Image (cartoon, helix red, strand yellow):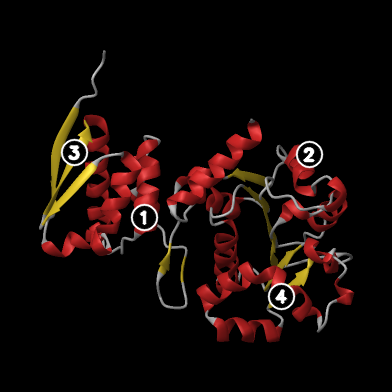
Amino acid sequence: MCLTKTTTKSFKLFNNDDAVIFGVNDANLHLLAEQFDVTIHPFGDHVDIQGESTTVNLVVDILKHLANLLHSGIQVGQVDVVSAAQMAREGKLDYFEDLYNEVLITDAKGKPIRVRNLGQRKYIQTIKHQDITFGIGPAGTGKTYLAVVMAIAALKKGQVQRLILTRPAVEAGENLGFLPGDLKEKVDPYLRPIYDALFAIMGRDHTNRLLERGVIEIAPLAYMRGRTLDEAFVILDEAQNTTREQMKMFLTRLGFNSRMIVNGDLTQIDLPNHSRSGLLQAEQILRNLPHIGFVDFQASDVVRHPVVAEIINAYAQHTKE
């Protein structure tokens, strides 16, 4: 019979101000204790960590990296703890602090926006170097938010002249005529995540001014037909709900000095009558073409509450069974 070897190690803060890495009411410590099945006892300027020796060492290393971030002037929150924990489990904790070297843009409150994990970093690098980027994976991985971040950054640098944001309005059958209001009022409910990202990054007033001037255009996918999108940063969200014909139509709108991002989750296809997803077909046909990049997000890339990743994995396992 093999007994698990347990040990206790202490992690000491450099100064009392560093206690912020423990979180409000030690929330970050509770998160680490649950994630790694260890017991953590805080005592003033240090904590004692008890559990299986290898796991205890990981938790100590995570706390060291979080403290290093804090000393670099970076505010540490629960999302950083979740990212560090995931990278530690994957044996990639040594790369954790590197994620914070680049500020993509600052939001409306002056807060720097950075990638949170290796999946997001690959996504950003692909957007920078490819004309069309496909981000495929579960909700909560930051696909839409980071796409908007990169679009706004390109606009501010003068790399593009306008932003075009679209998604298929499957819930309305793409036939928006029967809905009350003008085009904007008809499609707004289906584009709320994009609006939320715009408001968070630029503020509501600035966003509305750019919408009024036509610098930002938000429209249902059906209204892209027949257009050529030059000098534009174009984002297609919820792309798993495009038909094959819609996806081909959208991709062939790409003009000169433009970039496209196509985001979707192939586990959440809502197309009626068992129609085949245009995103699924595009992945099969275009994955090896030049100037087109694919980034596959996993549940481990989710930057929401840790239980979200567990839910995604549970549903995936249920589907396999």
Q: Amino acid at mark 3?
A: Gln
Residue, disc 1: 80
Marks 3 and 2, the one that precedes in the sequence: 3
Residue 272 screen position, x and y as percent? 84, 53
The residue that appears at 40% across and 71% down in the rendered structure is 111
The residue drawn where x is 68% and y is 79% is: 215
- Asked if the residues shown at circle 4 and circle 2 are in contact, with their CB atoms under 8 angstroms apart, the answer is no
Q: CA distance from mark 3 to mark 2?
A: 51 Å
For the C terminus, which image quadrant?
A: top right
Contact, mark 3 vs mark 1 (Cβ under 8 Å): no
Task: Check if mark 3's residue and mark 2's residue have beta carbons within 8 Å.
Answer: no
Name the residue tied to disc 2: 285
Q: Is residue 214 above or below residue 111?
A: below
| Secondary structure type for disc 3 | strand
Identify residue type, mark 4.
Asp
Q: Which residue is tagged 4? A: 188
Label 4 vs label 3: CA separation? 51 Å
Element carrying mark 4: helix
Q: Which mark is residue 50?
A: 3
Local crowd at mark 4 within 10 Å, few (<14), some, or many (≥20)?
some
Could you tell which of marks 4 and 2 lies nearer the N-terminus? 4
In terms of depth relative to the viewer, which is nearer, 92 or 314? 314
Q: Secondary structure at mark 1?
A: helix
Q: Earlier in the sequence, mark 4 or mark 1?
A: 1
Under tag 2, what secondary structure?
helix
Residue 134, position as x, y percentages in the image: 66, 49
**Dot placed on the residue nearer the N-terminal end, 1 or 2:** 1
